[in-house]
Amino acid sequence: MRKFLLAAGVALAMIAAPITSFAQVGVGISITLAPPPLPVYEQPPVPDQNYIWTPGYWAYGDEGYFWVPGTWVQAPQIGFLWTPAYWGFVDGVYAFHSGYWGPHIGFYGGINYGYGYGGSGYQGGRWDHGQFAYNRTVNNITNTTIIKNVYNERVENITTNRVSFNGGNGGVRAQPTAEERQFAAAPHLQPTSVQMQHQQQAASNRNQWASVNHGAPSIAATPRPGVMTGPGVIRAKAAEAPEAQHGAPNEAARPQPAAPRPQAAEHQPAQAMERQPAAPRPQAVEHQPAQAMERQPAAPRPPEHQAAPPRPQGAEHQPSAAQHPQEPPHQAEQRPAEAHPVEAHKGGEAHDDDKKPPQ
């Protein structure tokens, strides 16, 4: 009888031990700072049969919170499932509730860890005749030669808010059901030794500390416990939301199509020809008396051409003007209407036709 009571006491101690020892949180230790949001990361492929996904979590140490990578762990017993750890806010402090192994999934704070752990229960797989079957819709399965026991089951999409704790200001508002309370009270196993070593390795890596990685640990997930380097080790993604990375480039690109618009004004030759020759006009007034009459239709300037009608003689009797088509047509547009024909021929040829009386 005494031996039975002693064995029962040891069993009860084993059940209660994970709640305080796994994350180095025990009686008398209070944490008033909330854990950081859950990092965003991809799940490594399933390494072998009967390995169950255990999501990553924030643990607490001497220098604050540090990230324990999610990893694939071989179940310690056929038929056992993993209930993830979580932080809960109670009486003004954040307390850590360790994960555990058991035949049923218990309460884990309503935290959405993803990959089958949507906040309640587990939709990532189930035991089937001594073999673990994987739901392909939520697990990363690449080696179908080894992982053959698979099925496809639709999982309802739940918005991921990355909140890592239950209760308190900003925490998940979830309460355990009567069934989950029963599962938590039933006998279960504490984390395995490889899981404990996995956490210790994370604690010894400063890049895993939130004060260093600012919520984006360099090792967010691993293919097996304790494997912190090599293929299958996953780095956390940027903590920024996906909508904001794609929005910035779009906003930056919007002004680009508008840049060519001012260039469209350059395709209007009439306006360009009217405004560019402002400086050189006084230099060539006396050299091209007749071209202003030839270019009048291309330049809509009533003030400049109103005085031009008194010069019909020059337009008909100045053949030398046709000999100079290379000169800029706009250079003589400001020639006064009273210009003397005699001076116009001082720099050119003299013609007898100038002496003829007007017809």
Image (cartoon, helix red, strand yellow):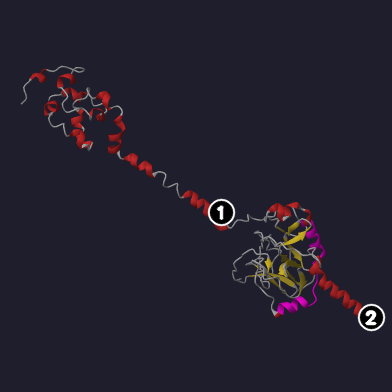
The part of the chain drawn in magenta is 179-202
* Residue 149 image position (x, y, % from top left): 69, 69
**Would residue 231 be visible to someone looking at this image?**
no
Horizontal side of residue 252 vs 188, given as left or right: left
Badge 1 or badge 2: first in the primary sequence: 2
* Residue 231 image position (x, y, % from top left): 71, 54
Depth order, front residue of 182/64: 64
Mark 2, residue position: 2
Relative to 181, say whether 234 is above or below.
above
Relative to 87, say whether 187 is above or below.
below
Depth order, front residue of 282/136: 282
Work out which quarter of the rendered image holds the C terminus and state it: top left
- Image quadrant in which you'd find residue 283: top left
Q: Residues within 10 Å of mark 2 (few under 14, many from 20)?
A: few
Q: Residues within 10 Å of mark 1 (few under 14, many from 20)?
A: few
* Residue 233 image position (x, y, % from top left): 71, 55
Mark 1, residue position: 245
Three-letter amino acid code at the position of disc 2: Arg
Q: Is residue 192 magenta?
A: yes
Question: Measuring 93% from the left and 79% from the top, which residue is drawn there?
Answer: 3
